[in-house]
Image (cartoon, helix red, strand yellow):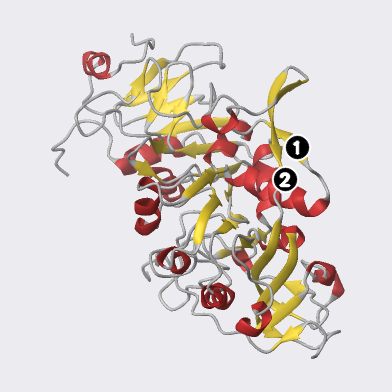
Amino acid sequence: MTQDKSGWTRSEMAARAAQELQDGFYVNLGIGIPTLVANHIPEGVNVTLQSENGMLGMGPFPYEGEQDADLINAGKQTITTLPKSSFFDSATSFAMIRGGHIDLSILGAMEVAENGDIANWMIPGKMVKGMGGAMDLVAGVKRCIALFDHTNKRGESKFLRACTLPLTGQNCIDMVITDLGVFNREDNQSRFRLTELAKGISLDEVRAKTEANVIIE
Amino acid sequence: MNGKIYNSANEALADLCHNGMTVMSGGFGLCGIPENLIAALRDSKASELTVISNNAGVDGFGLGQLLETRQIKKMISSYVGENKEFERQYLGGELELEFTPQGTLAERIRAGGAGIPGFYTKTGVGTLIAEGKEHKEFDGEVYVLESALKADLAIIKAWKGDAEGNLIFKATARNFSPMMAMGGTVTVAEVDEIVPVGSLDPNFIHTAGVFVQRIVEAKCEKRIEQLTLRERA
């Protein structure tokens, strides 16, 4: 296979995020790239996927003809059940999330700041979508990983000194995975540190494309 | 009249709709929305509505129909990203919008029906959502006070129901409906199937009949928003 582009593809980013899944984890995957994480769950690791619209134990997409309009995930995609699945109402679903019963949330971001703030729900005057369950997830889930393209369409860093967009949550991101690499921090008082480079990416490129004050060495 | 059973969605809402009322409408995306009751609400021509619903339907379907007819004055929702008409009316200043995080929305509705006027949550602390609201510290962590939501009318969709108003829901079509059944002064449920009283196992009833005042059997289109399939090997 030829590599015409350096850095991780969306699928490779999802595969890297999947390495953070641990056996027995209850996990919520956000819409977009995070949804792809389900395709890369490591062999022998048993995780239970939560969908905040009211399901634990989310199964794969249905075969044609087996789709059910009453059975969707939070991205409104048709899905299936597994033998372990359960359904519940939205208040119970968010009791799981807010109450700290979910081990890991992997979500997309428009901006992440060096202090762990995240913005992913609105652009004032331009885009009106809403936060959905994202504010509850970042406030309540034990560990949150932000998975996003390192730069925007204009090539500007999305990993910033401070978020410019309205926040989804304060100091809640524990790990950042972008197309350039992985940034981790020990706890929410520590600085992020580059811990892994994506294929074909140099330290200088990460430095050049990262506005956030993170440890790159 | 057979208990709480009505013959049609229009009949069930006939004397309940008025201008300026607050309506809760169940569903997540287009999953579990009360399609026939939304159409009946449209036909009632009641306007200046405040609608509490996780989403606003899509263009021309679900609550999107009530946006087209300009019957909605204000929405209380967590996500409205699938509806261009909504975005147009909102950015044009024609529609009020109160964004509420999804879990906070579910809990505000639950609280409203459960006799709890407000509650503290950590969701949204440090964001626009928490501005101007009371904050309080518990065990070293800061929480924000959120208020309960109630409605003059709740319209919901269930799978099976009986003349007593007992309901069971199917799969992820349950979502907000059990809380909305509690939060409505009057709750009207449309169901795929009305079954005889006594045929639902009491162990598996999701919403008890006390929360449901009217029930109607009606066929839904059940439109799928994102058909995603797996290839056969």
Q: Which residue is mark 2?
A: B148
Q: Which residue is mark 1?
A: B119
Question: For this rendering, which residue is in front, A215 or B47?
Answer: B47
The x, y position of residue B141, in whole percent, is: 70, 21
Tell me the element at label 2: loop
Task: Look at discs 1 and 2 and give the one toward the viewer.
Answer: 2
Residue at 70% across, 62% down: B152
Question: What amino acid type is highlighted by mark number 2?
Answer: Ala
- Would you say B23 lies left or right of A43 here? right
Which quadrant is the C terminus of chain B positioned in?
A: bottom left
Question: For this rendering, which residue is in front, A15 or B82?
Answer: B82
- Number of disc labels: 2
The x, y position of residue B15, in whole percent, is: 69, 77
Based on the displayed image, in which of its 4 quarters is residue A120 positioned? top left
Query: Is B1 rendered above or below residue B226?
Result: below
Question: For this rendering, which residue is in front, A113 or A17?
Answer: A113
Q: The residue marked by circle 1 belongs to what chain? A: B
Question: What amino acid type is highlighted by mark number 1?
Answer: Phe
Residue at 71% across, 40% down: B147
Q: The residue marked by circle 2 belongs to what chain? A: B
Q: Are marks 1 and 2 in contact (CB under 8 Å)?
A: yes
The x, y position of residue A143, in whole percent, is: 57, 30
